[in-house]
Image: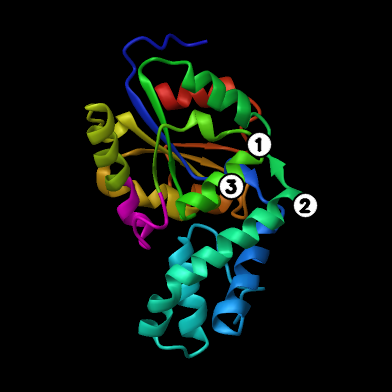
Amino acid sequence: MVSTQDRRRLVLFDVDGTILNSGGAGRRAIKRALIEVFGTTGSADSFPFAGKTDPQIILELMTGEGLPEELIRRKLGTFFKVYIRNLEEEIPVARKQLYPGVRELLSNLSDMAQTILGLLTGNIREGAEIKLKAFDLNNYFQIGAYGDDSEDRYKLPQIAISRTAEKFGRSFWGKEVVIVGDTPHDINCGKAVEAKSVAVATGWTSLDELKNHKPDYIFEDFSDYEKVIEAILA
Ligand SMILES: [Mg+2]
């Protein structure tokens, strides 16, 4: 193992495609809630969810069906209540998967005194917690920025950094902030704060496509988790 003394890092993980695959539970919960609240799923079967925030997905899907944005926004609160109820039903029966090396990666990082682990995800907070609870992972994360903090993923890194400063009185800058994710949006959203990006091809974007976005580090998956820790601490 590399030495971990005085290596301050705020490590922010995406959820779907990076930590786990919900086995379609997320999409099914969204589709059921769309039917209940808006009466249609629109193009939810073919629409790319990856890298987008939950409110962004709903707004794009339903404006695509011709619904007025103001009406969609007014019903978002109700939508997400129904969605969470559905997700709680869908997750236990889904063929979900925790990706290789993830538990070891989280467990080792969380043992490092100078490292704070957090989430940076388009999931609304409760949704992320339900998905992570299925693998008993919530305790690893001390902080988070979620789809209900902003529908714009590109605003989430600054929110996570500010929230960490408020909660722990510790400021993380530049490459001390590491964003771990499976899509070009994960790689690119950290560029404004000059974060380090660690990309992983376990989700729906190929290794080559991710490489085009020039992440600082890239992995096929996290099975060689010690290499990933080295990259995070480098
Ligand atoms: Mg993802």
Residue appearing at x 62%, y 33% in the figure: 136
**What residue does disc 1 label?**
135
For residue 17, which numbered disc appears in the image?
none
* Sequence-earlier tag: 1 or 3: 3
Q: Are marks 1 and 3 in contact (CB under 8 Å)?
A: no
- Residue toward you, 170 or 185: 170
For residue 130, which numbered disc appears in the image?
3
**What residue does disc 2 label?**
93
* Sequence-earlier tag: 2 or 3: 2
* Sequence-earlier tag: 1 or 2: 2
- Residue toward you, 232 or 28: 28
SS at circle 1? loop
Residue appearing at x 48%, y 90% in the figure: 66
Instruction: Locate the C terminus and report the quarter of the image it occupies.
Output: top left
Residue appearing at x 52%, y 77% in the figure: 61
The image position of residue 161, as x and y in percent, is 28, 39
Please identify the quarter of the rendering in which residue 175 is found. top left
Residue 182 in sight in this render:
no
Residue appearing at x 44%, y 66% in the figure: 55
The image position of residue 220, as x and y in percent, is 62, 38
Residue 198 in sight in this render:
yes
- Where are the magenta residues, as a range? 146-157
- Callout 2 environment at 10 Å: few (<14), some (14 to 19), or many (20+)? few
Above or below, comparing residue 118 to residue 210 in the picture: above
Report if the beta carbon of the residue with label 2 is closer than 8 angstroms to ligand 1.
Answer: no
SS at circle 3? helix
Q: Amino acid at mark 1?
A: Phe
Q: CA distance from mark 1 to mark 3?
A: 9 Å
Q: Is residue 217 magenta?
A: no
